[in-house]
Image (cartoon, rainbow, N blue to C red):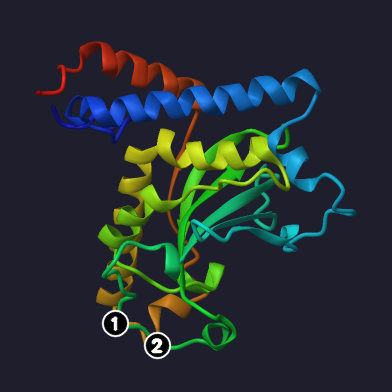
């Protein structure tokens, strides 16, 4: 079955294993909401708690959140406007990447000299003023000061992202880990669209590096709803064939 114009995900083509993983992730995301809501909290409020005045472009929590075992990293900040409160950026560092993965050939940038290893931006999650996600998006290299990896390699990294930490907020760490699992099909599509946007820029014959072009910041984006995604996963699971063996 081909994807519908409104929903790019070919749900009938997803394996039962993938759907079950997405269903489990959805349960974890909703459980994080349940626990936070009991105390009138939300994901954004958790990550900003005790951080002082909220300043545009600053990273929250200060120093980012980094899991030294999985080499997963994220931070929250704000600068886009348009009804968005801010967004999370999720990364994976070189030591946590699948074996054999390498950045594509790309011009060096000043920020690369400041890193002790390379990192890849996986996905950004846009949040509204109530502290809930509204969209997923990818960015050009200059936006997140990372290294550029081809789409298939970034997709291979998704399984490696795991914020297995209690601090600074266990619910937020669980939430962001499982958001990348719950929305895995959409994320894969966005990462491929990211590469397509860069290739389209190249075909225009512009001078300089596409990765540093300030005219290209958001390379792909799609609106999301946790509740609707969970419902779609449940529906697809009811129709999915049992796994062989």
Pointer 2 residue: 107
- Which quadrant of the figure contains the N terminus? top left
Residue 93 in the figure: left or right of residue 115: left
Badge 1 or badge 2: first in the primary sequence? 2
Mark 1–mark 2 Cα distance, whole angstroms, equals: 17 Å
Q: Residue furthest top?
A: 238
Q: Nearer the viewer, residue 140 or 214?
A: 140
Q: Nearer the viewer, residue 222 or 39?
A: 39
Tell me the quarter of the picture where residue 107 sits: bottom left
Q: Nearer the viewer, residue 88 or 73?
A: 73
* Tag count: 2
| Residue appearing at x 21%, y 13% in the figure | 239
**In the rendered view, would you say 125 is above or below 108?**
above
Pointer 1 residue: 205
Secondary structure of the residue carrying tag 2 is loop
| Mark 2 nearby-residue class (10 Å; few <14, some 14–19, many ≥20) | few
Residue 19 percent across, percent down from the top left: 30, 26
| Residue appearing at x 9%, y 23% in the figure | 245
| Residue appearing at x 16%, y 17% in the figure | 242
Q: Foreground mark, 1 or 2?
A: 2
Q: Nearer the viewer, residue 207 or 140?
A: 140
Q: Residue furthest right?
A: 52
| Residue appearing at x 55%, y 42% in the figure | 176
Secondary structure of the residue carrying tag 1 is loop
Q: Residue furthest front?
A: 69
Q: Is residue 128 visible?
A: no
């Amino acid at each position: 079955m081909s994807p519908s114009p409104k929903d790019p995900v070919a749900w009938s083509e997803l394996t039962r294993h993938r759907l079950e993983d997405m269903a489990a992730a959805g349960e974890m995301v909703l459980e994080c909401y349940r626990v936070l809501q009991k105390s009138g909290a939300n994901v954004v409020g958790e990550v900003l708690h005790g951080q002082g005045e909220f300043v545009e472009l600053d990273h929250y929590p200060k120093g980012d959140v980094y899991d030294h075992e999985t080499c997963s990293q994220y931070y929250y900040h704000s600068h886009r406007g348009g009804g968005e409160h801010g967004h999370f950026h999720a990364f994976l560092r070189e030591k946590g990447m699948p074996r054999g993965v390498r950045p594509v050939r790309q011009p060096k940038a000043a920020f690369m000299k400041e890193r002790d290893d390379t990192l890849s931006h996986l996905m950004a999650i846009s949040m509204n003023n109530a502290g809930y996600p509204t969209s997923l998006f990818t960015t050009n290299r200059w936006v997140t000061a990372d290294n550029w990896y081809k789409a298939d390699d970034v997709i291979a990294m998704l399984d490696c992202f795991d914020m297995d930490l209690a601090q600074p907020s266990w619910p937020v760490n669980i939430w962001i880990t499982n958001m990348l699992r719950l929305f895995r099909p959409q994320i894969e599509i966005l990462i491929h669209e990211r590469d397509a946007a860069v290739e389209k820029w190249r075909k225009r014959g512009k001078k300089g590096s596409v990765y540093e072009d300030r005219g290209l910041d958001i390379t792909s984006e799609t609106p999301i709803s946790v509740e609707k995604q969970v419902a779609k996963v449940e529906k697809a699971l009811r129709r999915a064939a049992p796994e062989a063996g």
